Amino acid sequence: MIYRDLGKTGLKVSEIGMGCEGFGEDACKMTKKLFDVAEAAGVNYFDLYTSNPNVRKAVGEALRGRREKFIAQSHICSVWKDGQYKRTRKLAEVVAGFEESLEQLQTDYIDVGMIHYCDALDDWRLIETGGILDYTRELKAAGKIRHIGLSSHNPQVALKAVESGAIEVLMFSVNPCYDLMPASEDVEELWNEKNYAEHLTNMNPDRQRLYETCQRLGVGVTVMKCFGGGDLLDAKLSPAGVALTANQCIHYALSRPGVAVVLAGAHSVEQLKQSISYEDATDAEKDYALTFASFPKISWQGHCVYCSHCAPCVKKIDIAYVTKFLHLTEAQASVPETVREHYAALSHHAGECIKCGVCETRCPFGVAIRENMTKAKQVFGY
């Protein structure tokens, strides 16, 4: 298992994590089985957005005797009322719901306290001014949560939260179909078939800016909806019109700037093992570029997806990394220090490019690589 830094939190997280969708399967008997498989494979991160008390208690039992082996991302503002899940911004309900969750989970702290489901700018302002953010800060000061997070599907809202400096972790929906969609306060627009009826081209700029800002500011991204609820794995359901494999979906998400862990939903032990098997997959099994190039409804033409099909460079430049660092600087007035340091650490740099163009003949998306190398040399100075 490969472990990554979760932004600036200091936490080392497994790049494959667990979503909680399957914890409620088989009257919650599945929970312990999934945690057993996760522990054996080195998976140390999981998300718990649900407020279902039966699921929370099952997770608490599954963690008994091994709490320190797992990093828990649990949601604040997700409460159980009148026998069903509810998202609330009423502070009294939030406080009672969080204290109840600690009791049900049999723990006295949560590693990442995730402010639940904020997809509207007005909602973010309410969180900032209505006591919710202050409450999470109080929880952190008291040691009841170690880090503050926010979950969102809207890149404009998420960017506001990230740029505010208030959150350390962002839970966001990342996959190659949703990444083309413009921001919306209605999450269902992400999988609405009519939005994919027209030919879509390249990543939405708000989403690209969000990922790059998270990378620059050290906000760790935890990925939800990597498989689009399973739709991306089925050609009949996929908005792209072509089925992707689990390995391709995971690899795409892990290739985005700022991403630390993919929270893979699993309704069975076999599904979780399939996601974990990404760690042993070959480069060919992870490669998504040629499949992307075959999408009938979606085009990434001219856009670098960091797939490294351009390699090997005759001057041994890591073109994908150079391009990623270039993108991280393009929206800034100056080069971020961390990006400059990472660029400097590369064995070969853009200034060594001899403009032979061999890389461009290999690129499935017609990226102007030589032009990018020229820009990178201008930006970084060598």
Image (tube, rainbow, N blue to C red):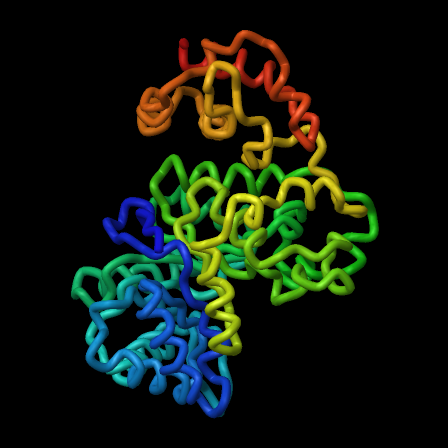
- Rendered image quadrant of residue 368: top right
Residue at 29% in and 60% down: 134
Does residue 235 appear anywhere in the picture? yes
Q: Position of residue 286 (x, y in %)?
A: 55, 48
Left or right: 246, with 109 as reference point: right
For the C terminus, the image quarter is top left
Give the x, y percent position of residue 242.
74, 54
Residue at image point 29% right, 64% down: 71
Q: Position of residue 92 (x, y in %)?
A: 34, 77
Task: In this rendered view, identify the residue nearer to me: 325 or 41.
Answer: 41
> Measured along the vertical axis of the image, is residue 59 above or below residue 246?
below
Q: Looking at this view, is 324 or 212 the one in front?
A: 324
Q: In the image as oriented, which residue stretches furthest toward the top?
A: 354
Position of the N terminus, as image quadrant, is: bottom left
Report whether 112 appears left or right of 78: left
Which of the pair 25/10 is nearer the observer? 25
Quarter where residue 185 is shown: bottom right
Q: Is residue 272 above or below residue 125?
A: below
Q: Can the viewer see residue 124?
A: no
Residue shown at the point (58%, 36%) measured from the top left = 305
23 left or right of 229?
left
